[in-house]
Image (cartoon, coloured by chain):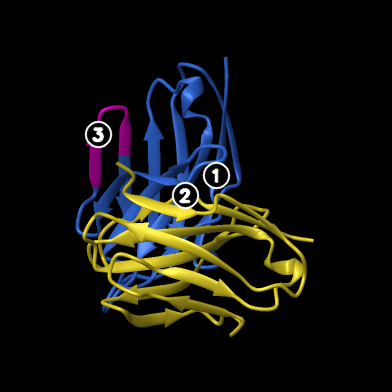
Chain colours: A yellow, B blue
Amino acid sequence: DTAVSQTPKYLVTQMGNDKSIKCEQNLGHDTMYWYKQDSKKFLKIMFSYNNKELIINETVPNRFSPKSPDKAHLNLHINSLELGDSAVYFCASSQDASTEAFFGQGTRLTVV
Amino acid sequence: GEDVEQSLFLSVREGDSSVINCTYTDSSSTYLYWYKQEPGAGLQLLTYIFSNMDMKQDQRLTVLLNKKDKHLSLRIADTQTGDSAIYFCAESRGTGGFKTIFGAGTRLFVKA
């Protein structure tokens, strides 16, 4: 049983396109996150959702929008993709904001 | 990563001990974590320590926390080739704790 699952695992798309990455957790956690990992493996938080309420938006461009249809899902939608958006995007969840996070396997996004 | 710093590389021989160091800046951090990332995979929690503890041992792993100096270390005893990975230090911040800040990761290379 996969605790945090993301789809797709790989995504190659052209500049200007709109794409979504899906994330689901079956741990019953209250908080979910999206992280971006760049080519240097630097990991930076993008969004945090708690009970379907956005808690943090780390100066991420508004082309990125998280959507949470329910507590178990937090999808990432990206409009007008740019070359600089190429990275690995990780979804994560935690029981609450101060406990350890469980990560998905990542989605490698390549914008060409 | 500006607030959580780690050295980028560490190389050790199989069977030796590895020590990965991390410094952080926020004295209100409640939890400090060590995550492991293997190639092409998500982050897995290795261990964590509460900010009111000095040391935690878990099998081959020993975490030392110097709260005064805001210094965290991870010691891996009897390092094996399977320990080769990127190790991320992370801190969970203060009030609300909705933000977990990661370091840039230390790449551990284990030579046979």
Say whether disc 1 or disc 2 marks the residue closer to the N-terminus. 2
Work out whether A40 lies above or below B19.
Answer: below
Q: Is residue B68 visible?
A: no
Q: Pointer 2: what residue?
A: B88
Tell me: A39 left or right of A3: right
On the same chain, marks 3 and 2? The answer is: yes
Would you say residue B81 sits in the magenta stretch?
A: no
Name the kind of residue labelled 3 in the image.
Asp
Place of residue A66 in the rendered image (x, y in percent of width and height, measured from the top left): 46, 76
Q: Residue at x 37, y 61 (%)?
A: B91
Place of residue B66 in the rendered image (x, y in percent of width and height, measured from the top left): 32, 53
Work out whether A6 lies above or below A54.
Answer: above
Could you say which is closer to the camera, residue B88 or residue A21? A21
Name the kind of residue labelled 1 in the image.
Thr
Place of residue A2 in the rendered image (x, y in percent of width and height, measured from the top left): 34, 44
Q: Pointer 1: what residue?
A: B106
Magenta-colored span: B55-62
Q: Chain of mark 3?
A: B
Q: Chain of mark 1?
A: B
Say if mark 1 contacts mark 2, CB within 8 Å: yes
Q: Is residue A58 visible?
A: yes
Residue B65: numbered disc:
none
Q: Pointer 3: what residue?
A: B58
Say whether disc 3 or disc 1 marks the residue closer to the N-terminus. 3
Element assignment for label 3: strand
Predominant secondary structure, magenta span: strand
Work out whether A102 lies above or below A98.
Answer: above
